[in-house]
Image (spheres, rainbow, N blue to C red):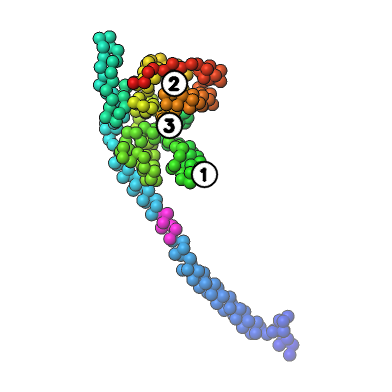
Amino acid sequence: MAALQGNTGPDGRSAGARKRVLVFRQMRMGRARRDGESRTAVRLMLFAPLIAVPVLMIASLLVGATVFYENTVAGLTTPSNMVAAFANYGGAQVLDRNGVVLYRFPESNGGVHLPARIDQVNQSMIDATVSTEDAKFWESDGVDVLSIGRAALENWRTNGSPFNGRGGSGITQQLVKQTLIPEADRTSQSVLRKVQEAIYAVQVSHSYPKQQILEWYLNVTNYAGPYDGVESAAQGYFGVHAKDLTLAQAAMLAGIPQSPAEHSPYLNPDGAKQRQVEVLNLMVQHGYITQDQADAAAAEELTYQTPD
């Protein structure tokens, strides 16, 4: 009797009973583990499509974007043709015996081109243009994503469309739009056209010096009416060469391209004056001139040539 009591545990069970309980518990734990694994497998099978579909969509988008980028770059005009497109300035001119221009034949698009190298443009005109059109031009890669985003958000709030309204394109993008984008597509607001323009701008920015890009821009930009290019605008409005522009004259011209009809001093003198002051303030903001210089330029009375 004592021996039997010695094999009995605190719970009153014999060693054999305890062993059977332990085995049973192990079997139950194994079954629970297998049931848990089965439930996990079922969950994975149910949720796998929900996980796989977004992953596949993202992968497809990345592949599509890569293919689009490579095809766009491959279709980019060759460097020699790009230079030809950018440098296609200048119409025929009639000069007197002293070299004075008597008549300028307009180009097929109605504009008048008088080419000018960047070293033939007054520094005030360069600074006014950069301040107004692309403050980050000298250090950007051709596309200012933040400016585009701010413009798109403002347009969305104002007009209900990110593309209808104020533009966020910098100098390089504007140059690309005017030269490398087919004329029929330049007014298109499609996302693909905007992306193509951005890709072109990045490629141009990486392929050419900033000074060259700015020179091209200044030579193809319209300054209202028939004046395409800063030299023709300087002579047309003020009767001076681009290198002789005053700060007041440069600020007036630099403000025109954003909206040529609205900021033309011939068509809207008050609007043009207001825009000139805005340009001068931007030049102060970006550190190109002092406030005293801006105030003096704003007070300067400008005399204009008789329109051609």
Residue 243 in the image, given as x and y percentages of width and height = 39, 16
Mark 1 and mark 3: span between their CA atoms?
21 Å
**Which residue is identified by label 3?**
259
Which one is in front, 52 or 112?
112
Q: Quadrant of the C terminus?
A: top left
Helix, strand or loop at mark 3: loop
Instruction: Determine the image quadrant of residue 32.
Output: bottom right
Q: Earlier in the sequence, mark 2 or mark 3?
A: 2
Question: Magenta part of the protein: which range?
Answer: 53-59
Q: Which residue is mark 1?
A: 157
User: From mark 2 to mark 3, how far is it between C-alphas?
Assistant: 16 Å
Tell me residue 233's x, y (percent): 37, 22
**Element under label 2?**
helix
> To which quarter of the image does residue 113 belong?
top left
- For image coordinates 29% across by 15% down, the residue present is 101
Residue at image x 46%, y 61%?
A: 51
The numbered dot on residue 250 is 2
The answer to which quarter of the image holds residue 304 is top left
The amino acid sitting under disc 1 is Arg
Classify 19 as above or below 242. Answer: below
Please tell me whether residue 8 belongs to the stretch shown in magenta: no
Nearer mark to the viewer, of 2 and 3: 3
State the residue at coordinates (50%, 26%): 274
- Furthest residue toward top: 98
> Quick check: marks 2 and 1 in contact, CB under 8 Å?
no
